[in-house]
Amino acid sequence: MSKPFVSIEQLAKIYTSASDELVVFEDVNFGIEKGEFVCIIGHSGCGKSTILNVLAGLDMPSRGSIIMEGKEIRGPSLDRGVVFQNYSLLPWLSTLHNVSFGVRARWPQWSKAEVLEHSRRYLEMVGLADSLQRKPSELSGGMRQRVSIARAFATSPKLLLLDEPFGALDALTRGVIQDELIKVWSETQQTVFMITHDVDEAILLADRILLMSNGPRAGVAESVKINIPRPRGRATIVEDPAYYKIRNYLVNFLVNRSGERKTGDSQAPTFIDPSISGVGNENSTNTETAALVAAN
Ligand SMILES: Nc1ncnc2c1ncn2[C@@H]1O[C@H](COP(=O)(O)OP(=O)(O)OP(=O)(O)O)[C@@H](O)[C@H]1O
């Protein structure tokens, strides 16, 4: 069988001190297909950001490797774009130049006009056409995160890594930017790996959700297929018959099963399709439980 676009193989992260050894996660194996939107969910400290940082080339695993298009990831590259929760914009540059900075680095042969036109187009997609000349300090948190998203997509990375990009935003802004992310993603069909603590956000955005067991010695326990048809919208997705089955399944895992240890974990995570009859009928529909999980 051919390898997926990105292949995470036997990944482990271990911190050692003079007196102690912390195995954050081990035997992590999964693949990401080209054009796929994959979300990863798990309780705090299980190692989600570490996995994302290894994918970005910003951290090294203690064991195992990540192979992208046949080549091992060993450092940062323009092939991989990252959006962090804290925006990380350059404060002295305007909105437009925060985006064009990356675009110019990506396509050095382009003329200045081409670079600016391309950057402007992505800022328009996220609703910032009227704020091109503003500095980050003159933007709200939501607007700053839109700039980060435009900047990441504008350089057309082969893999886009989103580390809880909406974690610091209020619920209303978060919803609007989720819609914008869906719009940009459906226009570009880029491959996305995203960390979120929000079960509803993951169902809205993902083709597949990876569920991590708790650390230490965390692992990717299950891979949950989200077969709700696209386009998806926040208002309409709840009407899909599969929605609550999937949601219940995820909440049940996080509340009741994420602490379970699997033995012989070295294989791919169990593949689950909660829309199939008999799967995901756990009784945990209430919003409070989901909010609790989202906050953890
Ligand atoms: N330099 C370090 N030395 C020791 N332990 C570390 C170091 N960096 C991270 N850790 C530990 O690694 C674990 C995983 O951290 P990571 O940030 O990847 O988790 P996470 O799942 O993304 O958490 P959260 O959801 O809270 O962001 C944590 O327990 C953290 O304390």
Image: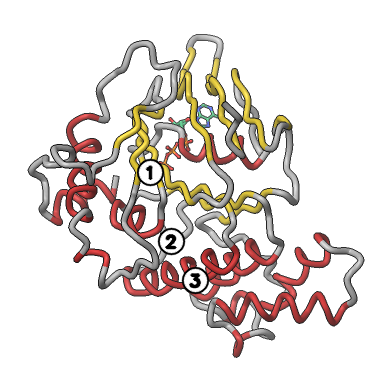
Secondary-structure class at tag 1: strand
Q: Which image quarter holds the N terminus?
A: top right
Amino acid type at circle 1 is Ile
Q: Is residue 195 left or right of residue 211?
A: right
Q: Which of 282 and 93 lies nearest the eye of the viewer?
A: 282
Residue under the image location 71 percent in, 32 percent down: 70
Mark 2 residue CB less than 8 A from any atom of ligand 1: no
The local secondary structure at tag 3 comes to helix
* Residue furthest front as drawn: 1
Q: Residue at x 25, y 22 (%)?
A: 260
Question: Residue type at mark 2?
Answer: Phe
> Could you tell me which residue is drawn at 52 percent across and 34 percent down?
31
Identify residue type, mark 3: Lys
The answer to whether mark 1 and mark 3 are in CB contact below 8 A is: no
Compared with 133, 288 (above or below) is above
- The answer to whether 22 appears left or right of 223 in the picture is right
Query: Dot 3 corresponds to which residue?
Result: 183
Give the residue at mark 2.
Answer: 166
Residue 209: mark: 1
